[in-house]
Image (cartoon, rainbow, N blue to C red):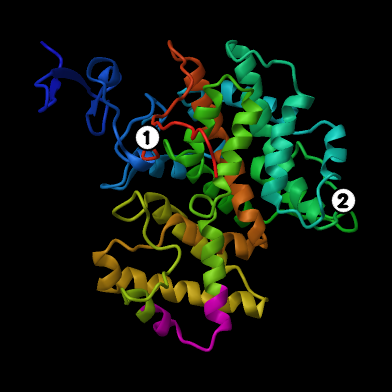
């Protein structure tokens, strides 16, 4: 049977080219245009790469139209119910769920790598105390290549595996220490007796002067948030890691580039924007209904943050999963009057979005950023740490895509083309007045 093709015709010259149609496991067919410039002299124009498959990948599948998200073929709903973040890390990197022995060995390996080089403590001192934690994350992650310059042969599968283990293990320590440094608190070393998310919360919040015990509901919520954010296909930060890695840059630098991209408010800062919006509503003299009316007014620039999604045209599957644990945390929360006002506003907005025909008809459901921001606030995590935790979660996705790319038969440096609209070629003037 002949492969499916599409024909492209140049109406001016009559020249034609047959372009192969590649069939994915699931998802839309993809036209292979790799020979288009060579055979026809054309580039394609696709701002934002919204219709362009930049790579071939077997890691994550998502469909915004139907609200599907799957890691290595496993629906996110099943993973959220049956798995945990570290097991999901294993799945994303190695391609299959681990047997008990393999998972125990993987967990032990991660525990071995949670410490970071002592000299990195001095590296933190180079930052201002008011530095944003994401700025510290970018700098310290990029600096890892200076402290861990062994196992850097990107063509060696074992070396890539060691790098992955190090990044998964050290990112919580780096993240927690960025918070501690900014708040003038002593660094807390990892505790191997705790699980992955418990250890992070311990390093964030414990103090030498009194015992600290991680609340199980907080650890559960954080683990779920991290699992749901572990990967999301070829988004801006993942594409950045792939593009940086395609130059054969060291993986720590590539991941640092991903963190820098995630820092952008259009990508990783959405949950922070949700809390800022809720705080503004609480501190204003206007009612919630006033803000809802403004959101419905097409002539008003105000937008409700945390509702709808750029890709998902239905209820974000991650939001459905995180909503339950969000409500569970709120049931156990009490004490801070200002915080409770914010949480009350959030729950009122949620009810409106789930019942109001205006929001339902436009698929403006509460998204994962809406719920994760509320959970972080209830746990006591400051807003400038929201994106830090996002980057900690997404590290496994980045390094899995980088590893997959390094295994490709033909690794080519990324080189997007452009539609040039500048001045035509012109001569330098002989005399300038």
Position in image of residue 360 (x %, y %): 27, 66
Residue sitting at x 82%, y 41%: 189
Which range of residues does the magenta coloring cover?
279-292
Residue 36 is left or right of residue 396, and the answer is: left
Q: Residue at x 57, y 74 (%)?
A: 279
The residue under the point 86% across, 45% down is 125
Label 2 crowd (10 A; few <14 / some 14-19 / many >=20): few
Q: Residue at x 13, y 25 (%)?
A: 10
Q: Is residue 202 left or right of residue 7?
A: right
Tell me how far mark 2 sits from mark 1, CA to CA. 60 Å
Q: Reading the chain from its start, which is encountered first: label 2 or label 1? A: 2
Mark 2 falls on what kind of element? loop
Question: What is the total number of numbered labels drawn onto the structure image?
Answer: 2
Rendered view: 131 above or below 342: above
Read off the residue under disc 2: 186
Q: Nearer the viewer, residue 276 or 381?
A: 276
From this viewpoint, is residue 56 visible? Answer: yes
Q: Main secondary structure of the magenta part?
A: helix
Residue 224 in percent (x, y) is at 53, 48
- The answer to whether 95 is drawn above or below residue 359 in the figure is above
Query: Which residue in the structure is indicated by mark 1?
Result: 424
């Amino acid at each position: 049977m002949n492969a499916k093709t599409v024909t492209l015709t140049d109406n001016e010259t009559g020249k034609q080219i047959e372009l192969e149609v590649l069939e994915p496991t699931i998802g839309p067919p993809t036209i292979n245009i790799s020979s288009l410039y060579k055979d026809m002299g054309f580039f394609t124009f696709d701002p934002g790469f919204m219709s362009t498959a930049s790579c071939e990948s077997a890691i994550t599948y998502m469909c915004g139209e139907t609200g599907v998200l799957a890691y290595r073929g496993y629906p996110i709903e099943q993973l959220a119910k049956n798995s945990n973040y570290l097991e999901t890390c294993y799945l994303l990197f190695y391609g299959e769920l681990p047997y008990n022995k393999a998972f125990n060995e993987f967990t032990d390996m991660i525990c071995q790598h949670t410490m970071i080089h002592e000299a990195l403590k001095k590296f933190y001192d180079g930052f201002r105390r008011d530095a944003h934690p994401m700025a510290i994350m970018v700098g310290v992650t990029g600096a890892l290549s200076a402290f861990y310059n062994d196992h850097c042969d990107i063509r060696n599968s074992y070396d890539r595996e060691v790098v992955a283990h190090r990044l998964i293990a050290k990112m919580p320590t780096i993240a927690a220490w960025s918070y501690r440094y900014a708040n003038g608190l002593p660094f807390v070393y990892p505790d191997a007796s705790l699980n992955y998310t418990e250890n992070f919360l311990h390093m964030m919040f414990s103090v030498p002067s009194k015992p600290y015990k991680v609340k199980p509901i907080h650890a559960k919520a954080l683990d779920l948030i991290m699992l749901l954010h572990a990967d999301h296909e070829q988004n801006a930060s993942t594409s950045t890691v792939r593009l940086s890695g395609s130059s054969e840059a060291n993986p720590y630098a590539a991941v640092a580039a991903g963190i820098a991209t995630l820092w952008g408010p259009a990508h990783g800062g959405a949950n922070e924007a949700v809390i800022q919006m809720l705080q503004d509503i609480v501190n204003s003299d206007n009612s919630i209904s006033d803000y809802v009316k403004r959101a419905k007014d097409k002539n008003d620039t105000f937008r409700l943050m945390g509702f709808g999604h750029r890709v998902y045209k239905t209820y974000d599957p991650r939001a459905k999963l995180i909503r339950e644990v969000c409500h569970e945390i709120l049931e156990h929360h009490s004490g801070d009057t200002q915080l409770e006002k914010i949480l009350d506003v959030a729950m009122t907005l949620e009810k409106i979005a789930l019942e109001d025909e205006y929001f339902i008809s436009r698929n403006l459901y509460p998204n994962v950023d809406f719920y994760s921001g509320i959970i972080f606030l209830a746990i006591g995590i400051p807003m400038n740490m929201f994106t830090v935790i996002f980057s900690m979660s997404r590290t496994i996705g980045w390094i899995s895509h980088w590893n997959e790319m390094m295994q490709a038969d033909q690794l080519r440096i990324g080189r997007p083309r452009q539609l040039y609209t500048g001045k035509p070629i012109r001569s330098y003037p002989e005399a300038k007045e």
